[in-house]
Amino acid sequence: MIAVYPGSFDPITLGHLDLIGRASRLFDRVIVAVLRNPNKMPLFSVQQRLEQISLSTQHLPNVEADSFDGLTINYAQIRQAQVLLRGLRAVSDFEIELQMAHTNKTLSTQIETVFLATSNEYSFLSSSVVKEIARFGGSVDHLVPPHIALDIYQCYNHNSPMLNPITTQAIPLKSMPMETPPEMLHDQQV
């Protein structure tokens, strides 16, 4: 059975890779399909994302990376897939994903959507979160594979925060006169 796992994967995260690894044990073949969306301004080109995915999944012989444009369901039909694979992080994901699954079912009754819950440690993780942290100089080493972290730091012209930790210096506050509580004023006046 062939499963297509569609997404932008800009960049692919450890959460995505956890899902791919688990799916590789459930399906004969998993195709990680990068959507070419001309309306988005991605951090990485489609070719870079395909290379990142291929390098990250090279230990999984039944996983391949590919790209497509247009409707996911049409791509799945072309690849003779029986399953669309989707990850769920939270209840909010479920509402959106369920609507998409129902829509896809109206386009093809031959392809099922299978939802996999993300592992707890990745339930907060998204590509957007990774980019936001990196944009402001934070470490993403614990959120993506090492080679992708380096790619991200290069995009934002940062060195790894793990190699160059940000140091802070406390600035002492001037002591401010404290207001005397009303009950103390009363005691003082007596």
Image (cartoon, rainbow, N blue to C red):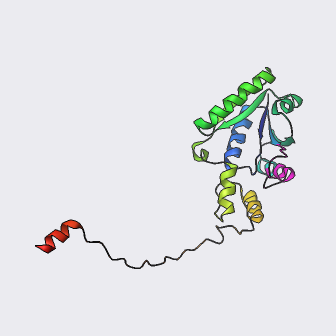
Q: Residue at x 75, y 57 (%)?
A: 148
Question: Is 145 or 37 nearer to us in this picture?
Answer: 37
Question: Is 89 or 174 nearer to us in this picture?
Answer: 174
> Up-down: is 80 above or below 125?
above
Where residue 58 appears, x then y in whole percent? 80, 48
Q: Is residue 3 left or right of residue 13?
A: right
Question: Is 169 or 30 nearer to us in this picture?
Answer: 169
Where residue 85 appears, x then y in whole percent? 73, 33
Task: Name the image quarter holding the C terminus.
Answer: bottom left
Q: Residue furthest left?
A: 190
Magenta segment range?
35-52
> Up-down: is 40 above or below 71?
below
Residue 10 among magenta residues: no
Task: Name the image quarter holding the N terminus.
Answer: top right
Q: Is residue 188 visible?
A: yes
Q: Quadrant of residue 22?
A: top right
Where residue 99 appears, x then y in whole percent? 69, 29
Where residue 10 appears, x then y in whole percent? 76, 50
Q: Is residue 139 left or right of residue 180?
A: right
> Up-down: is 153 above or below 63?
below
> Up-down: is 59 above or below 3?
below
Q: Residue at x 31, y 73 (%)?
A: 178
Q: Quadrant of residue 62?
A: top right
